[in-house]
Image (spheres, rainbow, N blue to C red):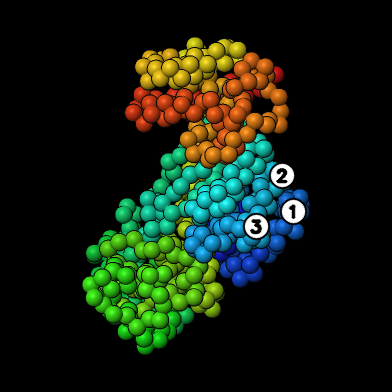
Amino acid sequence: MKRPSCIDLFCGCGGFSLGFKRAGFDVLAAIDFNSEAVDVFRKNFSEVPHVLHKDLTRFGPDELSRQIGATTVDVIIGGPPCQGFSTSRQRDGANSGPRMIEDPRRYLYREFLKYVAFFRPKVFVMENVLGIKSAAGGRYFTRVQQEARAHGYRVHPQVEKAFDLGVPQKRVRQLIIGTRIDLADYFPSRLQRAPRACTNPTLGEAIGDLPPLRAGAGTEISTYDMRRRVAHVARYGRQYLFETLEVHLAENLTGHRSRPHSDRDLRDFARLREGEHCAEAMKRGIEFEFPYDRGTFKDRYTRQHRNEPCSTIVAHLSKDGLMFIHPTQNRSLTPREAARVQSFPDWFEFPVARTHQFRLIGNAVPPLIGEALGLTAKAYIEGVNIKSKLIQFPGKRIPASLEEAVSRIMEVVVAASNRSIGALGTEAFKRAWCAVAYVYPGLHPNSALEHGTDISNTVDEVPSILHIEPRLMTPYYVQSGWPVLLEPVVTEAWRRYHAGELKDDEFYCSEATQAGLKYRKQA
């Protein structure tokens, strides 16, 4: 069977691509504006035919199409630079007012969507920080979804905790996933964990075998301590070291060198207990020497705990590393330790300059997250291609016409207005919910409740439903696309789904969606 293909935009050093490669994808092209990121990508992915140092605002999808000799691709992945939406910018006021408007990075999602519109992938996955949801009152979060739907995609946002997918850190990221509207099946909300992923991984499990270092010590290329590795495996097992990090494939240990710290910082480090930040230490009477405001910088110094996941690895590690103090050694984490926490294998090489290493590692999508998304996308594509996932509903549940579908929906809307929707029989509700899927095949149930506050009465087209029951079209929530009138119906569907009354196939109604798409083509 032909391997599915993908393109990686804003590829960075390649964490997303590595995950998709491990999941069985061919990466046709990768593009980034940062020359160091592109150099690292090329070094680690010699099999990727087109690794391009390009500015996506000036390099269009038609040019890429000519270079790779393809006009279609199965998946487009990418993480438009997230600094414009970061929570640190929310704290300093940069997510509102003129600074928000002036930051051009906030609009790079449109370059991503240009490629989606051109190549028409079956799936796209955009990864970003949680801050995109609240930046500018949620306007950018809304625009991404609204514009993706305008390109013909069924869109749903999804929050993923890296720890749940086997990454030993507290990283939480916002995904925006789109599937082409002509594909009736729904992208699963529960991602398929990579087989190599550990359950409940800890920082100690990720880095405990590495040779101890003093601050400022270590070399770019060194050797492993095999006695420490044996002891480490005896305590934690082999999975993270050998399956995730693939230590057996690395000829040498690279990037394990510690940055120097001032004597004052080292004295302050020593005052911290394992798993403690400076505000907690001050509560027990510890006095620190650092010259920062104690209220503003309450977590300025943080010693990580070996038996817990690490704090979120960020690009700011390149500055000082004070929030990433080693659990038992008086220094901050090394680039290799940070890469391991991100789930990069030990054979993956980074640039020699430590500052660049930290920046690329902190900006990367953890490969284990990429692999989970890749495995889920691959299963989705295979299911769509062979139509093996389409559900065979009893014929009576699929409306015979748009008029019948509208009638069923209005019955349940009336029940909701009378506060009797909860008493509606299971079969009657399933028939009404199937009608919703038939009428709105381009909307995703997972996005229905996270709809934002912006409401519109304007529609770009005049669908037949407007002539039958206008309230089922407008007003609607701009972010999710769902009609306001259906909010109580969707809420009830979710309640019944979580209660087990609706199974997956009955909640996502793929066959009814397919029937609705067929009706639209014929109308």
In the rendered structure, the answer to whether residue 293 lies left or right of residue 6 reads left
In the rendered structure, the answer to whether residue 430 lies left or right of residue 483 reads left
Toward the viewer: 410 or 386? 410
Q: Residue at x 62, y 56 (%)?
A: 106
471, above or below 293, in the image: above
Q: Identity of the amino acid at label 2?
A: Phe
Q: Quadrant of the N terminus?
A: top right
In the rendered structure, the answer to whether residue 146 lies left or right of residue 494 reads right
516, above or below 136, in the image: above
Mark 2 highlights which residue?
A: 118
43, above or below 65, in the image: below
In x, y percent, where is residue 350? 52, 71
Q: Quadrant of the C terminus?
A: top right
Query: Which label was assigned to residue 103?
Result: none
Return the residue found at the far bottom. Answer: 263
Q: Residue at x 55, y 13 (%)?
A: 407
Q: Identity of the amino acid at label 3?
A: Ile
194, above or below 280, in the image: above
Query: Which label was assigned to residue 101?
Result: 3
Mark toward the viewer: 2 or 3: 3
Q: Quadrant location of residue 38?
A: bottom right
The Cα–Cα distance between marks 1 and 2, rounded to whole angstroms, is 9 Å
Mark 1 highlights which residue?
A: 60
Q: Identity of the amino acid at label 1?
A: Gly
Crowding at dot 1, Cα within 10 Å, few <14 / some 14-19 / many 20+, comes out as some
Toward the viewer: 81 or 264? 264
The Cα–Cα distance between marks 3 and 1, rounded to whole angstroms, is 24 Å
- Residue 488 at least partly seen: yes
Task: Give the secondary structure at mark 2.
Answer: helix
